[in-house]
């Protein structure tokens, strides 16, 4: 057993599905490594996926005081374009707000 002092735990290489942050999962599958930090997990307001604290968008860490969740760091414009029929996916906070106020848009 190693006695290294690290604040970031080592990801389980054999079971990527055990990693609950969708950005960490993609990074491990593509690069074999990730900024792996699981807690606290949040649900992205724009893509409805879970992400860890190290993959939150710095610009939208907490968009409004009444919202618990924030926004992950992926490109939501591209994600929305590639998944047009997926429910609860938005391009931006403004798009989300407009859609929730008037669902016909």
Image (tube, rainbow, N blue to C red):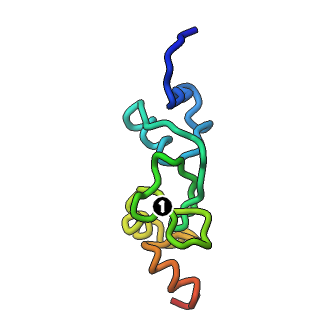
How many numbered marks have been drawn onto this rendered protein structure?
Answer: 1
Is 100 left or right of 95, judged from the image as shown? right
Q: Position of residue 19 (x, y in %)?
A: 58, 39
Q: Residue at x 55, y 46 (%)?
A: 21
Q: Residue at x 54, y 61 (%)?
A: 44
Secondary structure category for the residue under label 1: loop
Q: Position of residue 66 (x, y in %)?
A: 62, 73
Quarter-of-image position of residue 86: bottom right
**Which residue does the numbered mark 1 point to in the structure image?**
61
Quarter-of-image position of residue 27: top left
Viewer-side residue, 23 vs 59:
59
Name the quarter where the N terminus is drawn: top right
Residue found farthest to the top: 1
Q: Residue at x 53, y 62 (%)?
A: 70
20, above or below 28, in the image = below
Quarter-of-image position of residue 35: top left
6, above or below 88, in the image = above
56, above or below 45, in the image = above
Q: Position of residue 78 (x, y in %)?
A: 37, 65
Viewer-side residue, 7 vs 31:
7
Q: Residue at x 43, y 73 (%)?
A: 92
Q: Position of residue 10 (x, y in %)?
A: 52, 26
């Amino acid at each position: 057993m190693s006695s290294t002092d690290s604040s970031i735990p080592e990801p389980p290489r054999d079971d990527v599905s055990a990693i609950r942050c969708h950005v960490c999962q993609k990074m491990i599958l593509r690069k074999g490594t990730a900024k792996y930090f699981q807690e606290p997990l949040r649900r992205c307001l724009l893509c409805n996926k879970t992400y860890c604290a190290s993959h939150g968008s710095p610009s939208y860490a907490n968009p409004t005081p009444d919202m618990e969740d924030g926004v992950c760091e992926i490109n939501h414009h591209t994600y929305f374009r590639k998944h047009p029929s997926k429910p609860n996916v938005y391009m931006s906070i403004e798009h989300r707000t407009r859609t929730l106020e008037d669902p016909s848009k």
